[in-house]
Image (tube, rainbow, N blue to C red):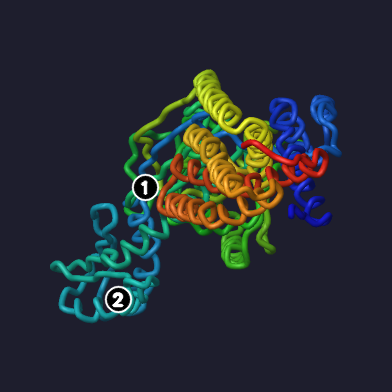
Amino acid sequence: MLQIPSWKRILILAVCLFGIVSAAPNLFYGRVEAHNDAIAAAEKAGFETEAQAAARAAWPDWLPSGLVNLGLDLRGGAHLLAEVQLADVYKARMDALWPELRKALADERATVGAVRRAPSDPGVLRVQIGEPAAMTRALEIAASLATPVVSLTGIGQNDLAISAEGDQIVVTLSEAEKLATDNRTMQQSLEIIRRRVDEVGTREPTIQRQGSDRILIQVPGIGSAEELKALIGTTAQLGFHPVIARGSATGTVPGIGQVIYPSVEEKGLNYTLDAVPVVTGEELTDARPDFDQNGRPAVSFRFNPAGARKFGDYTAANIGQLFAIVLDAEVISAPVIQSHIPGGSGIITGNFTVESSTNLAVLLRAGALPAKMTFLEERTIGPELGQDSIDAGSVAALVGMAAVVFFMIASYGLFGVFATVALGINMALIFGVLSAIGGTLTLPGIAGIVLTIGMAVDANVLVFERIREELRTARGPARAIELGYQKAMSAIVDANITTFITATILFLAGSGPVRGFAVTLTVGIITSVFTAIYVTRLMLVFWFERRRPKTITV
């Protein structure tokens, strides 16, 4: 007999209600999106404007507000392919090694003689010693600065390759260290880009590594590729450098280990600085917009313990000296060190506006990119093109659904109507689940939904055909329906498990659009099995209990 316990009926109806209610906000997408954005902006700023309050009031707070995020091809946005200049990191490592090697060699000046840095290619450190006969000892000193490579593939190898050419020590990174450095640099770049993009509140960006030195960046909803480049392309490399000299002369060639940067505050003024900063932006733990003692916009900062110690030691030993604050190869401020600055906190002043100080704080807080990036490919996908994709996908889904509905009703009559109602609930469940998990819908994802529409009634077809077969054996209608579901179950489970495995492989092995297709297909498989086995059967039970037919026609 057809028997479904009351608790199971309530549970099935509750799941259907959840899907419909969770999917409903997508019918009012613009209003709900403005509501969510207003809440997020108010929480981030700590206060709510009148416009945000109006946007928030446009959708009741007590209703669900989860939405299906639209991918780049549906919403429009920016696409960038960036190449990370890994050679910059090699050069920075050699520049940072020079003071340490110079000090180590200077401790044995009586043996190796005078020491100076010789001109070399980027990524190569050449050190000339005064006593070539002591080259063996000099190489031993240089080798003592090497450390083991921190990677699984570099076990047992050192990070420095050291050799001698005449009276010069030649130091480069070993191949194992270069590989480990490349991986660290790419991972750090990915994380910093992700944090910068997240700071502006975009939804579901795609940020992933491609090849050995490239990063794919796709951000839906952003205005243009230029806007995205301005956000992530700014290096925000902050450094605190000792000042060697200052002047307005142009064309001056810096000495070895020195750089010349222009002043932002005073046009035509240049500073000659030590190339190696005392403290860098990587040692910052916090940066936020602030105001100086005169009420002008500024940026306050705080170092980690290591940075605070170096900052405090340097200021204590150089009272009365100029100390340049450098941002992206420009001196934004060069104050005189008035006193020892302990604690590792301070403030950056300059010609800031409130907006520019906020932007600078965001960039510093997200971290400095470890290397510059060259943009090889950039595209802006307008919202009109995204809307065209949505319209085309909607037409395809509606045509597919209309064809399925016509076939089911024409083939199975009233039972086909039950299957059609279950199909509508299935669509609501798909969008409800995607909204609840914050899933992203792409054009291939719409294709997955269209495919699900066809697959969703497949289980019903199996059940209805089995019921037909049971009716031919002159069994009663109740028993025929019961056996129809029992005997079709194995075929339904088998077909959907194999499809589920395929979708899982697509998700794990694919990326971008392929994953979007796999996600919607997987959710569709689960919801279609649920609606075919439970929802359609529950409607049949309600109908049968109400009508009590002596015979049925499928």
Q: Position of residue 212 (x, y in %)?
A: 32, 52
Name the residue carrying label 1: 210
Taking the image as drawn, is residue 223 in sight?
no
Task: Give the residue drawn at x 78%, y 37%.
Answer: 39
Q: Position of residue 244 (x, y in %)?
A: 45, 51
What type is the residue that disc 1 sits on?
Gln
Specify the label residue 157 is tagged with: 2
Q: Residue furthest left?
A: 166
Task: Give the residue drawn at x 70%, y 45%.
Answer: 535
Task: Give the residue drawn at x 52%, y 33%.
Answer: 450
Closer to us: 290 or 181 = 181
Q: Position of residue 453 (x, y in %)?
A: 55, 35
Quadrant for residue 260, please give it: top left
Quadrant position of the C terminus in the picture: top right
Q: Which residue lies furthest to the front in this view?
A: 474
Closer mark to the observer between disc 1 and disc 2:
1
Q: Classify 282 as above or below 127.
A: above
Residue 65 horizontal side relative to residue 219, left or right: right
What type is the residue that disc 2 sits on?
Gln
Q: Position of residue 16 (x, y in %)?
A: 74, 43
The answer to whether marks 1 and 2 mark residues whose Cβ atoms lie closer than 8 Å is no
